[in-house]
Image: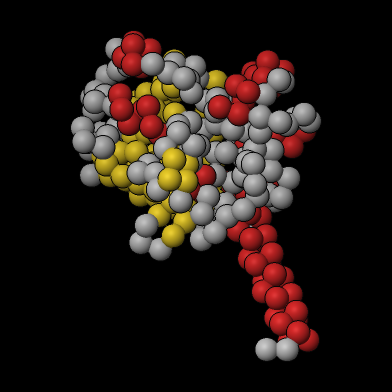
Amino acid sequence: MKINTILPTIAIIAIGLFLYNRNQITDFRTQRVFIQSDKVQKDIRIAQVTDSHSNQRIDISKLKDQIEEFNPHMIAFTGDLVDHKTEDLTVALKLMDSLRSMGVPVYFVEGNHEIANRHRKELLKELEDRNVIILKNSSHEIVVDENPIGIYGAEFYVEDHDYQEMLSSADRDKLNILLSHSPVKASWYADGDVDLILSGHTHGGQIRLPLIGGLVSPGQGLFPHYDKGLMELPEGTMLYIDSGIGNSVLPIRVMNPVQFSLITISKK
């Protein structure tokens, strides 16, 4: 092949890869999740947003419109609202303002990037001022159409004794939902005391391979077991992992576009 043919071919491939990746990290998808439970009489609707990492590429107004159309009873933000190196909180707070403007409770658990960020205290204070419900190995109850629901939130570095103490008063007759940024420890400790765990952290493995799944995840290494989607744990607890609307380290995704989730829990 002549040089004057090779160079244009390489350029076309490079442009194609650039545009593909740009779509993967910018144009978020809406993932709809359906779960059944004998603990609810009417549908419970939850919007889950996670791992935004102060992503400036996301169309926040479009995200708000799609969540509002879903008309959720609550919004769960499962950590990494900012990146560990974020200096300006404007983008993160704009996203949270958008979520809070919908008039439903917004629950938040910290991710590892909040913990590592030097503006952590300022961020948490800003969230408190916006009446975001921050859960740190603690719980909150919400009633939806006469269905009492226990909402629990685990800290990123939660240990087994913290987890057991947090859930010691859980009423197993009602629907219990746990927010945990990382799915790993939550999956270790879950013994049927919660019905659903909502997590993020993995970014879906960042790069996904056909039939294999995620390539790499923090804390799990190559080919993580807990990477993305809905799965059932041995004790019957359902675990759902959202791959998030942002990126950290490198803004690269393959077969794994940024996303948020609309979760419906229906009567079994």
Relative to 38, residue 175 above or below: above
Residue 264, x across and y down, in percent: 39, 45
The N terminus - image quarter: bottom right
Quarter-of-image position of residue 166: top left
The reply, left or right, for residue 42 in relation to residue 219 is: left
Quarter-of-image position of residue 211: bottom left
Quarter-of-image position of residue 186: top left
The reply, left or right, for residue 85 in relation to residue 35 is: right
Instruction: Identify the residue at image location x=57%, y=55%.
Output: 253
In this rendered view, identify the residue nearer to me: 221 or 138.
221
Instruction: Identify the residue at image location x=30%, y=38%.
Output: 238
Residue 192, x across and y down, in percent: 23, 28
Residue 225, x across and y down, in percent: 35, 44
Instruction: Identify the residue at image location x=40%, y=48%.
Output: 223
The C terminus - image quarter: top left
The answer to whether residue 94 of the structure is visible from this angle is no
In this rendered view, identify the residue nearer to me: 256 or 212.
212
Instruction: Identify the residue at image location x=47%, y=41%.
Output: 217
